[in-house]
Amino acid sequence: MMMQESATETISNSSMSQNGMSTLSSSQLEAGSRDGRSSAGDTSSEVSTVELLHLQQQQALQAARQLLLQQPGSGLKSPKSQDKQRPLQVPVSVAMMSPQVITPQQMQQILQQQVLSPQQLQALLQQQQAVMLQQQHLQEFYKKQQEQLHLQLLQQQHPGKQAKEQQQQQQQLAAQQLVFQQQLLQMQQLQQQQHLLNMQRQGLLSLPGPAPGQAALPGQTLPPSAGLSPAELQQLWKDVTGGGGHAMEDNGIKHSNNGGGGGGNGGGLDLSTNNSSSTTSSCNPAKASPPISHHSIANGQSPGLNHRRERERERERERESSLHEESGGTHPLYGHGVCKWPGCENICEDFGQFLKHLNSEHALDDRSTAQCRVQMQVVQQLEIQLSKERERLQAMMAHLHMRPSEPKSSPKPLNLVSSITMSKNLPSASPPNLPQTPTTPTAPITPMTGMPQVPSILGGANVPSMGAMRRRHSDKYSMPLSSGGETVFIFPEIAPNYEFYKNADVRPPFTYATLIRQAIMDSADMQLTLNEIYSWFTRTFAYFRRNAATWKNAVRHNLSLHKCFVRVENVKGAVWTVDEMEYQKRRSQKITGSPSLVKNLPCSLGYGSALNASLQAALAETSLPLLGTPGLMNSGSTGPMGGSCHGLLGGDPSMLMGGPPMRDSTGFTTTWTPTDTAAPDTPPPVHMQQIHVKEEPLNMDDEDCPMSLVTTANHSPELDDDRELEEGNLSEDLE
DNA sequence: CAAGAATTAAACATTC
DNA sequence: CGAATGTTTAATTCTT
């Protein structure tokens, strides 16, 4: 047992580091790579079947992960970097996985992912068989030739009688070999084609499909894979356990000579790679799979992993069985008098008999092991599917809220709303709607076997894969909507995804400044201590539950750096508040910075429920024909933030959040109360008066920063009384 | 490609 | 004294 654990541990460790590498910063990388020692040496010594099982599970996991990673849009990188990575990443890993012939399992994975039609499947399988056969022939041929060659060489050593003849023979042989090589080449080409085919199937190669640009959108690729009925799974199962029996052994058993598909020609040269394919694949993920953040790494908890998988599998099965009815026995593999071992369905009168059957038929042998692996993959696939569906749900919700998606698709001129909200990120803004963007994909996938904080395998994306991820939506569109103790996300994007960020280890696409402001705005009295800000971060975003030192430093840095954050000395220390004016100023500056975006300014203020007429007029002039047509304005068909400029849209704050109905259900109206924050005795906002504003004495030079806007904007119906107070202060300051 | 913003890291000071 | 809190500076990465 010990051995086994250590073995699996090394594996998971190595995989961990590999996966983590991509997500770690260079410095972290160094640390991570340390445990990347190879597991080969450790495991090469005597390996028990049990160990093998675990090993193989690990390998299968790796393979599955790889597939997972290859999912479109699994990266967090910007489209640009994606372009760079994808072509490299995907093909490479795929190639690694199937250097020779695609194993049944791999096929299955692919098939499951894309859900090929039975015909396609059949065709593919046939193709595969043909290839294998050909290969066999070729290899045999090659062998024979070699033998001949050998013989001839031997003959040559004898004082040649007929040198000429020999020469001729040799020439002949050479020619034959040439032919052989050509054939071999053809074979390779064929296989490459197969790979290509598979990759295409997987959407790895962004082939010009119906929606080229959308290749990364899970929703696009999903539909086909969405349906994987239990029946289909079962069928797959049978295919694997039955037809591909030997093939499975091939993989299931350690490196037993690929007796299976190979057809026994000992050649083994190439085919052997077949077995190692999984291992190889597990080695390269470092590059190929950025998604798995080191979080997931943590997940790789070596010893426990297998158990967890086991459980997961069982649970899965249970679920399946529950579809029919509740499982009868106490064993997850037993229900309704039938053995539920995949592909078995043996009838057992009672539980005892079942147990007997289980022990005899499904003992720990190669077959069972292989079946286990397959089941694991099935579960993996289901998980992937789940994550995809989840992602789709996210997209749907987001869409219903503020139609974040459909970015590029609508080349339509940005309407006021979108352009405004996007302010500086205008162009890239469209995609940025998180979930749809690379960000999300990662997260959803993460949901590996119920890890609490599944790092983004993707992730990474996730996210995570990038050191300094930027895709900040920054301020652009936030609007203060906090009221009372309730946290109302002012980021339209966050709102609908609140739960998402809270649980998914995905970095929120907002700048620290924006988040800090949000935190403070969320507080009851618009002020927070540093520690409270920290708390908000960790509470609100799973992403900030790690690397505390880093992001906390960043928070402090931002607090100090930005003038919009004001430190207020308090009785019991100091609290931080937001100088909204400064904040808006900053933003407006950014906006004004680029002439083309000037028009966005008004809305960039985000608040305004009532823009003054002159401004509106100005807006109208600034080539914003939509302004006059309210209907269009709130359509927000363009950017993610469409509709965030509720001020212009009639001041219905609910619109901002995407509509009343979802608001409550999606939880972007968080219910937590900042009780832990905002100490009861903390002085009211009035204290703002005595704050010592950083250096800049608030000069009123801001004609460019229409304070009037700010103030009037604050009159948004949603604003609570507290805000009124502040507004007063603000206006005072201004005047 | 350059400028600017954001992020990250780190040194250092101050306060608790 | 050590940890937490603030300030600054610099390097790096992204975005515009």
Image: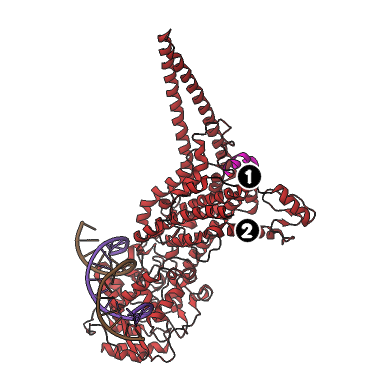
Chain colours: A red, B brown, C purple
The subunit carrying tag 1 is A
Other-residue count near label 1 (Cα within 10 Å), few / some / many at <14 / 14–19 / ≥20: many
Residue A245 is covered by the magenta coloring: yes
User: Which residue occupies the extreme right position in the image?
Assistant: A349
Side (left or right) of A621 relative to A639: left
Side (left or right) of A98 relative to A691: right
| Residue at the disc numbered 1 | A366
Type of amino acid at the residue the image marks with label 1: Asp
Q: Nearer the viewer, residue A716 or A668?
A: A668
Residue A488 appears in the picture as rendered = yes
CB atoms of marks 1 and 2 within 8 Å: no
Type of amino acid at the residue the image marks with label 2: Glu
Q: Nearer the viewer, residue A628 or A304?
A: A304
Image quadrant where one finds the C terminus of chain A: bottom left
Q: Is residue B12 above or below residue A287?
A: below
Location of residue A487 in the rendering, given as x and y in whole percent from the top left corner: 46, 80
| Residue at the disc numbered 2 | A316
Q: Which residues are magenta?
A: A236-251
Name which residue lies at 42% across and 16% down: A170
Location of residue A167 in the rendering, given as x and y in whole percent from the top left corner: 40, 13
Q: CA distance from mark 1 to mark 2?
A: 22 Å
The subunit carrying tag 2 is A
The kind of secondary structure element at disc 2 is helix
Name which residue lies at 51% across and 49% down: A63
Location of residue A513 in the rendering, given as x and y in whole percent from the top left corner: 34, 74
Query: Mark 1 against mark 2, which lies toward the viewer?
Result: 1
Q: Is residue A161 above or below residue A241?
A: above
Name which residue lies at 53% across and 54% down: A6
Location of residue A375 in the rendering, given as x and y in whole percent from the top left corner: 61, 51
Q: Main secondary structure of the magenta part?
A: helix
The kind of secondary structure element at disc 1 is helix
